[in-house]
Image: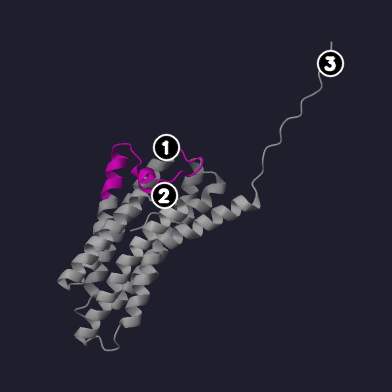
Amino acid sequence: MTSDLPNTPTPAQPEPTLGGQSKKSKQGWLNIAVDYGPVVVFFLVYRHFSPSDHNDVIAEVTAIASSVGAFMVAAVVALVASRIWLGRISPMLWLSTLLIVGFGGLTLLLRNPVFIQIKPTAIYLLFGVTLLIGAWRGRPFLKYLLEAAFEGLSDAGWLKLSRNWGLFFLLLAALNEVLRQYYNVANGNFGTWISLKLWLFMPLSFLFTFTQLPMLLRQGLMQEAEGEVLSDPPHE
C-alpha cells in the first residue's frame, strides 16, 4: 500500500558563501594586526628615532623612550580594536597588554630599558608555567587563554596543544634571556634586540603553529579551521 502523501523534499543544506569566507579571512588579518601590530610600531618608532651613533646617550635614551611609549599606546589601541572589530578581548591579550604597560611604565619611569627587555621573558614564563600546570592537571588552559573554538578539536587535542605551547614558551623565555645579554643598550645593540622580536620571534611562533597542524588534524580539527589556528596563535 502506497501513501497518498506527496514526498516532502529534503531541505537543502546551506553551503559556505563567499561572504562568509571573506569575513573569516578579514578576521584572520585583524587577529594578526591586533597581536603583532604593537611590536611593528615598537620597531618602526625606534628605527625612526635611533641615532646613527649609539654612543650618543641622550639620543639613544630619547629613541628608547619614544618607542616604548608608542609600544604602550599601540598595545592599548590593539586591545580596543579587538573589542570593537572582533567582539572580544582574550585573556591572553589582556595579560599581554597589562605587562606591556607595566614594564613599559617602569622603563620610562626609571629610564632603564632592561625592564622592557625582561617583559617577554616574564610573559613567556607566566604562560609556559600556567599551560604546563594545566596540562599536568588535565586542564587545557590554552583554550581559555585564547578564547578560541577550533572547530572539531577534541579535548585531548587541546590538552596536547596546551602542553606543546607551554614547552615552547619556556624555550622562548630562555632564548630572550640569552639574546638580551648580547643585544642591549650597554653594548649599543638594543635596536638589534627589537629587530629580533620582529624577525625571529614572530616567524618562530608561526612556524611552531604550523608544525602543530598535523597533530590537531589527527585530533579532530576540521580542515576549514586551519586558517583560524594559523591566524590566531598564542603570543606574548
Q: For this rendering, which residue is in front, 108 or 2?
A: 108
Q: Amino acid at mark 1?
A: Asp
Q: Which residue is at 55% across, 56% downward?
A: 25
Q: Position of residue 87 (x, y in %)?
A: 44, 50
Q: CA distance from mark 2 to mark 1?
A: 23 Å
Q: Which residue is at 28% across, 70% downward?
A: 69
Secondary structure under the numbered disc 1 in the rendered image: helix
Would residue 4 appear left or right of 136 to someone viewing this image?
right
On the image, numbered disc 3 is attached to which residue? Answer: 4
Q: Position of residue 63 (x, y in %)?
A: 27, 79
- Label 3 neighbourhood size at 10 Å, few (<14), some (14-19), many (20+)? few
Q: Nearer the viewer, mark 3 or mark 1?
A: 3
Q: Earlier in the sequence, mark 3 or mark 1?
A: 3
Q: Position of residue 148 (x, y in %)?
A: 43, 46
* Residue 47, placed above or below residue 14: below
Q: Earlier in the sequence, mark 2 or mark 1?
A: 2
Q: Position of residue 194 (x, y in %)?
A: 32, 72
Q: For this rendering, which residue is in front, 202 or 112?
A: 112
Highlighted magenta segment, given as a residue range: 129-155
Q: Residue furthest left?
A: 110
On the image, numbered disc 1 is attached to which residue? Answer: 155
Secondary structure under the numbered disc 2 in the rendered image: loop
- Label 2 neighbourhood size at 10 Å, few (<14), some (14-19), many (20+)? some
Q: Earlier in the sequence, mark 3 or mark 2?
A: 3
Secondary structure under the numbered disc 3 in the rendered image: loop
Q: Amino acid at mark 2?
A: Arg
Per the rendering, the mark at residue 216 is none
Q: Nearer the viewer, mark 3 or mark 2?
A: 2
Q: Amino acid at mark 3?
A: Asp
